[in-house]
Amino acid sequence: MNYISNHNLELKGKKVILRVDLNVPMKNGAITETSRIEKILPTIELLIKKQAKIIILSHIGRPKGKVVEGMSLKPISKKLSSLINKEVLFNKESISKTTRAEIEKIPNGSIMMLENIRFYKGEELNDNEFSKKISNLGDIFVNDAFSCSHRSHASIEGITKHLPSFFGLQITKEINALKKLTSEIEKPITLIIGGSKISTKINIINNLIKKFSNIIIVGGMANTFLKHTGKKIGTSIFENDCKNLIKEILKNAEKYNCKITCPVDVVVANNPQYKGSIKDIDEIGNNEMILDIGPKTILSIKKIIDESNTVLWNGPAGYFENPNFEYGTKEILEIISKKTKSDKIFSVAGGGETVAAINKFKKLKSLTFVSTAGGAFLEYLEGKTLPGINALNQNV
């Protein structure tokens, strides 16, 4: 594997194409959350130290090969500049021979960000001619966008066929954290998994069930589990036609001696805008919906985490966006972060809603590793080969 951190790698004066994920949330043109930008700073700082000419490729949104004014990377270039305390040149022009000439002119240790790479149709098509076009801008390629590495796109996979290619610092950190979960496990290991659909995460569960000691099911997934195992869940969201999937999970859990835990008590309300009340699973009324886990469930989760050496968390416990139903998610996070701080567990969390909850409760630095990747994080846990990672491994 080629790593950008290799001390013998001479980069002074080299034009380094750096692919990162700057697809950050924005509201009215303002960036509302910066963790994805912050995570790539170490790679940028290393390239500056090595006196490379840094050309940043990234995207925001899904413009589908067209120029969309509201999806420009210009505001992100300004934010990056303020975070790194260094000018980031922004090149809004279409990629051409002139672009390379402009890159040649910038001093060593400088940064130039190009406009949204998804403004070009060739990007998502992984068009070979477009891959060649962007590769002509640099001398080497660095992928530091784990969260995009499940995509066979030109700036992720195609470009590696035309340039010497390397792993960035952040992508290396991400892979190492997930390897520790999936290959170098310190048991007992616990998975806390939520989200609305079991069908989208069945492959993750089946891939990890043979390696994990406990799987705790919360959120909408728990509703589906409870419904298909004969419990009344009122008007709660759940997924139909999952009886066979649940049978499969229970069968595999028994086969591999993995304990499945579902909520025993919950917080319910007739409407998400009302305050909730705590009820045991068997007491839920026909007009009530489950919006959070209850105190008995939280205690059982705490006991399981206390007896674990490794914890993976993907999916909130309930409707945490509403303060009335945030307690379960907040408590799970508190339990994991306390155990992590006391150096008693290795903890990894990932997935869009999970990261949103971690950011809401300001615990981003309280876990061993928080993955800002969404689809790539989940596909890696499913055991899939990610095209971006595979391309880097082949480029040696």
Image: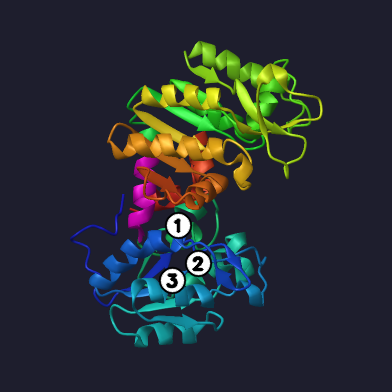
Marked residue nearer the N-terminal end (1 or 2): 2
* Helix, strand or loop for disc 1: loop
| Residue at position x 41%, y 50% in the image | 364
Q: Is residue 167 magenta?
A: yes
Q: Is residue 37 left or right of residue 30?
A: left
Closer to the camera, 299 or 68? 299
- Mark 2: few, some, or many residues within 10 Å (few <14, many ≥20)? many
Decide: is 379 above or below 14: above
Q: Nearer the viewer, residue 199 or 95?
A: 199
Does residue 232 lie above or below 289 as drawn?
above
Q: Which mark is residue 58?
A: 2
Instruction: Residue under label 1, please give it.
Output: 145
Give the alpha-carbon distance from disc 2 to disc 3, as whole Å.
7 Å
The residue indicated by pointer 3 is 56
Q: Amino acid at mark 2?
A: Ser
In terms of secondary structure, where does tag 3 sit? strand
Q: Quadrant of residue 19?
A: bottom left
| Identity of the residue drawn at 56% across and 72% down | 30
Mark 2 near mark 3, Cβ–Cβ under 8 Å? Answer: yes
- Kind of residue indicated by mark 1: Ala
